[in-house]
Image: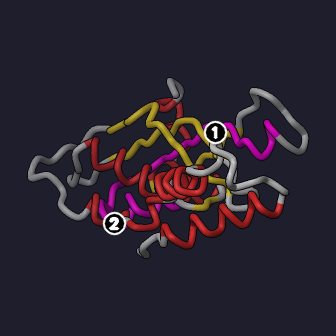
Amino acid sequence: MREIDRARLETAVRMILEAVGEDLDRPELRETPRRAAEMLRELLGGLELDPASFLAEPLAEQHEGLVVIRDIPVRSVCEHHLVPMVGRAHVAYLPAGRIVGSDRIIKLVDALARRPQLQERLTRQIAEAIERALQPQGVAVQLELEQMCMTIRGVQARESRVVTAVYHGAFEDDPSLRPLLASW
């Protein structure tokens, strides 16, 4: 966890605009450093959060069946190019008794996503956080993201999505459980 320095972000944005030859006295650009710094703070706000805190208190209720949370919105930033990656996450776990409210899983995904990331690492971090906190029989995480470093630059593969998946515990040991996730 760390605090984002908004003043330094504003200075950095000013420097970028000056480096590309923009006139910061133009009326359209006067507020851009402040706006861009706020946008970056929003996109990278997960750096100021402790993701584990969202799973710290399991519910008193216990559940033995499969829990699936689909279509969790994901907004992240590619750490190589500092451009957005957007899409959705699907998370499933097979409890060993302990569960948390579904909103806690959504908050965990958001906190881990809103930082400079690699999609593959994010997928793994979500699974590992759930595994550590809830100690389920198994956990599966799938991310389907549009990586703008591929769609608006480089190969410009418009509308392409990258899918990553991680299976731990029962989902890794018993592939016959994976068809339960086919509706993803």
> Residue 118: x, y in percent?
66, 58
* Residue type for callout 2: Ala
Residue at 41% in and 62% down? 129
- Classify the position of the N terminus by image quarter: bottom left
Q: Say left or right for 184 vs 164.
A: left
Q: Residues within 10 Å of mark 1 (few under 14, many from 20)?
A: many
Q: Which residue is mark 1?
A: 145
Please report the bounds of the magenta region as a residue range. Answer: 125-152
Question: Does 126 lie within the magenta span?
Answer: yes
Q: Which residue is mark 2?
A: 52
> Residue 8: x, y in percent?
56, 73
> Residue 119: x, y in percent?
64, 52
Residue at 40% in and 67% down? 48
> Residue 36: x, y in percent?
58, 52
Separation (CA) of disc 2 from disc 1: 23 Å
Q: Nearer the viewer, residue 37 or 131?
A: 37
Question: Does 39 lie within the magenta span?
Answer: no
Decide: is 106 above or below 180: below
Decide: is 181 above or below 171: above
* Residue type for callout 1: Leu
Question: What numbered label is drawn on residue 158?
Answer: none
The kind of secondary structure element at disc 1 is strand
